[in-house]
Structure formats: structure tokens, C-alpha cells
Image (tube, helix red, strand yellow):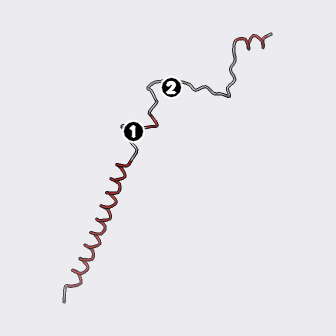
Amino acid sequence: MAKSRPSVQKRRNEAAKLEKAQIKAARKAARHAARGERDTTGGIDPDLAGIVAGPQPIEEDPLAIHYTEDDDKEEAS
């Protein structure tokens, strides 16, 4: 019996393995290139740029009703 069949199959498997490795290397290179294109602002996250540690200032609600002491005196009369 000849052993040509297993060696042919082995070559096919090796070729498929090599092709997969090339595809994987191309995807890795694309990810690496995309990493360099990202918008970086000196290592500072733009979402966190203006935040300071500690309690944050309360933003005024334009629709909120503001009462004064004079309002309370008028209601009591």
C-alpha cells in the first residue's frame, strides 16, 4: 500500500493552518493600526475632563419654583 494519501492530506491541513495564521495576522495588524488612529487628548478622557474630586455643584433647574421669606409671610397673612 502507498502512503501518498496521508501526506497529501497533511499538506492540505498545513496550508489551511497557514492561511488561518495569515488571516489572523492581518486582523491583528488592522487592530494595531486602528489603535493608533484613536482620538487621544493627552491621555485625558473627554467625558471626565471637567470633573473635580468631591461633591459636584448642583445645577439650577430652570423650571423649579424658588420661594423666598417674603412669600412665606404673604401666605401666612
Residue drawn where x is 31% and y is 67% of the image: 20
Viewer-closest of 47 and 73 = 47
Viewer-closest of 8 and 33 = 33
> From what the image shows, is residue 61 above or below residue 26?
above
Mark number, residue 41: 1
Q: Residue furthest right?
A: 77
Residue drawn where x is 38% and y is 41% of the image: 40
Considering the numbered disc 2 on the image, is that residue within a helix, a strand or a loop? loop
> From what the image shows, is residue 41 above or below residue 2?
above
Residue receiving disc 2: 56
Label 1 and label 2: CA atoms lie apart by 23 Å
Considering the numbered disc 1 on the image, is that residue within a helix, a strand or a loop? loop
Left or right: residue 70 compared with residue 30: right
The x, y position of residue 4, in whole percent, is 21, 85
Q: Earlier in the sequence, mark 1 or mark 2?
A: 1
Viewer-closest of 41 and 74 = 41
Left or right: residue 46 compared with residue 65: left
Q: Quadrant of the C terminus?
A: top right
Q: Name the amino acid, label 2.
A: Gln
Would you say the residues marked 1 and 2 are in contact, meaning their CB atoms lie under 8 Å apart? no
Q: Residue furthest bottom?
A: 1
Q: Name the amino acid, label 1.
A: Thr
Q: Quadrant of the N terminus?
A: bottom left
> From what the image shows, is residue 1 above or below residue 29?
below
